[in-house]
Image (spheres, rainbow, N blue to C red):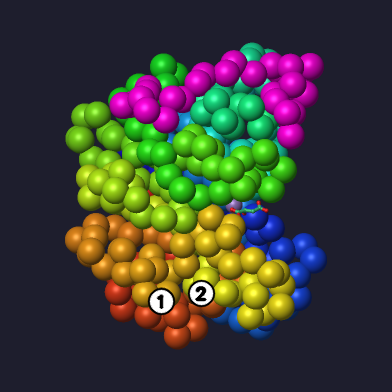
Amino acid sequence: MQIRVLGSAAGGGFPQWNCNCPNCSGVRQGSINAQMRTQSSIIVGNGSPDWALINASPDVLTQIKQTPVLQPARQMRDSGIAAVVLMDAQVDHVTGLMMLRERNSPLPIYATQQVFDDLTAGLPLVKTLSHYCTVEQRLISPEQENFSIPELTGIAFTPITLSSKAPPYSPHRHDPHPGDNIGLLMTDITSGKKAFYAPGLGVIEPQVEQAMRQADVLLVDGTFWTDDEMISMGLSSKRAIDMGHLAQSGPGGMLEELASHSTKRRILIHINNTNPILREDSPQALQLKALGIEVAFDGMHIEI
Ligand code: MLT
Ligand code: MN
Ligand code: ZN
């Protein structure tokens, strides 16, 4: 199984278009040791030209240009994106769907009922796309054991319900339902090796812990270093947890959780532009290095 990180930043990207925080202005000016990152997405493949796009970032066109394997050219109009799998209906995970409208066959999208509901009501992308390529809705039930993607043999996908947050426009924002957000345990059927992907992860519940135990590689929520990161910078009144993200530092934080998985490859992904781990020489980045925890970057390859 092959995973490639198309976009390793959280919503807004790095730098964010309207942000002058030390990280954003520093990377823009080239005055800090950091690299730019696009918004949250990965692809998963089995070595064939067909890939699953996990989340469709607003930056998907740039990401496709930066990823030649997604342009196989088997015919005049062609794409390596065989299907899309959505973890939630957040703007940074779904708005790239609009950019895929020139497809000449219906776009297969795997999502929960909650996500399809949001994409039919509050942000009706599925309805809009019905006037272009059309969408083939493939329903993920959060209770189901696993599903496979016919276009992509050899990989089993297990949806893991988790606590994060439905988007601000969703009627579920303050009324959570199972299926608003999922993580994905992906298994290479031949080798039995597994990767767990959860770009939004607020609470490590038992089913999440179990999925993390089974996995050989963890790609998990790296949004914020501290729970009050946005508040202390004067950028928002919300804590990380209010936005559905478990901060890395502090008691009960992601680093404590990752400490109990020290034998595996552990990668933080979906990193907010305020996070000090983006500066490769920051004390926080050096702390991660010492712990053997990686920070995802655009173009990162993971072979499992
Ligand atoms: C989040 O995960 O909280 C998002 O990145 C928010 C957004 O897309 O604006
Ligand atoms: Mn996000
Ligand atoms: Zn910023």
Q: Which label was assigned to residue 292?
A: none
Q: Give percent across and percent down for residue 102.
A: 73, 23
Q: Give percent across and percent down for residue 41.
A: 55, 45
Height in image: 170 above or below 142?
below
Residue 122 lies within the magenta run: yes
Q: Give percent across and percent down for residue 89.
A: 61, 38
- Which secondary structure, mark 2? loop
**Considering only order in the chain, which callout, 1 or 2, is on the residue closer to the N terminus?**
2
Q: Is mark 2 within 8 Å of ligand 3?
A: no
Q: Which label was assigned to residue 226?
A: 2
Would residue 174 appear left or right of 264 to someone viewing this image?
A: right
Does residue 39 appear in this view? Answer: yes
**Where is mark 1, residue-wise?**
250
Q: Give percent across and percent down for residue 145.
A: 31, 26
Q: Neighbour class for label 1 at 10 Å: few (<14), some, many (≥20)? A: few
Instruction: Work out which quarter of the rendered image holds the N terminus and state it.
Output: top left
Magenta-highlighted residues: 120-148
Would residue 70 appear left or right of 77 to someone viewing this image?
A: left
Height in image: 76 above or below 201?
above
Q: Neighbour class for label 2 at 10 Å: few (<14), some, many (≥20)? A: many
Q: Quadrant of residue 234?
A: bottom right
Distance Cα–Cα, label 2 vs label 1: 7 Å
- Proximity of marks 2 and 1: CB atoms separated by less than 8 Å: yes
Q: Is mark 1 within 8 Å of ligand 1?
A: no
Instruction: Work out which quarter of the rendered image holds the C terminus and state it.
Output: top left
Does residue 90 appear in this view? Answer: no
Question: Three-letter amino acid code at disc 1?
Answer: Gly
Residue 304 lies within the magenta run: no
- Residue at 72 percent across and 43 percent down: it is 169
Q: 91 and 289: which one is in front? A: 91
Q: 76 and 254: which one is in front? A: 254
- Residue at 55 percent across and 25 percent down: it is 113
